[in-house]
Image (cartoon, rainbow, N blue to C red):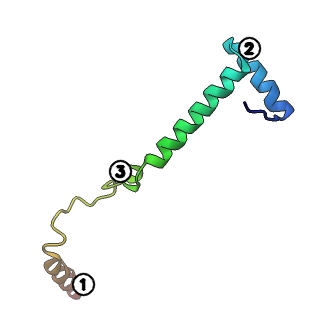
Amino acid sequence: MISLRLTKELQQQLEQFSEQRNSTKTQVVREALAYYFAALEEEQAQTPYVLGEALFGKYASGATDNSVNYKQKIKEKLRAKNTD
């Protein structure tokens, strides 16, 4: 058994919500706690990869050979700079 004190505002919101759903305040609190704990578990289960997955490659240049021919690209840029 648990006992807790609510502010008047929360008490009124809980009463209104339970009346609207035609359920008891106890049921509403149980469901709210279950929802809260499930959301916490889901949040903690997310890895850094999952959190950033939508951003990976979003701003990619499209060039896939930068690591292979970077020396050639540097030479081209230097030549272009010197000819200007």
Q: Amino acid at mark 2?
A: Glu
Give the labeled residue for mark 3: 53
Location of residue 80 (image quadrant) = bottom left
Vertical arrangement, residue 38 with respect to residue 81, above or below: above
Vertical arrangement, residue 12 with respect to residue 83, above or below: above
Helix, strand or loop at disc 3?
A: loop
Q: Amino acid at mark 3?
A: Glu
Q: Are marks 1 and 3 in contact (CB under 8 Å)?
A: no
On residue 19, the disc is 2
The alpha-carbon separation of the residues under discs 1 and 2 comes to 75 Å
Q: Of the residues under marks 1 and 3, which one precedes in the sequence? A: 3
Residue at (67% x, 14% y) in the render: 21
Q: Amino acid at mark 1?
A: Lys
Helix, strand or loop at disc 2?
A: helix
Q: Residues within 10 Å of mark 1 (few under 14, many from 20)?
A: few
Give the labeled residue for mark 1: 81
Q: Is residue 8 left or right of residue 72?
A: right
Q: Of the residues under marks 1 and 2, which one precedes in the sequence? A: 2
Vertical arrangement, residue 34 with respect to residue 79, above or below: above
**Of the two numbered discs 1 and 2 in the rendering, the one whose residue sits closer to the viewer:** 2
**Given the current orientation, which residue lies at the most extreme front position?**
1
Q: Is residue 66 left or right of residue 45?
A: left
In the rendering, at what x and y percent does residue 26 appear?
Answer: 71, 22
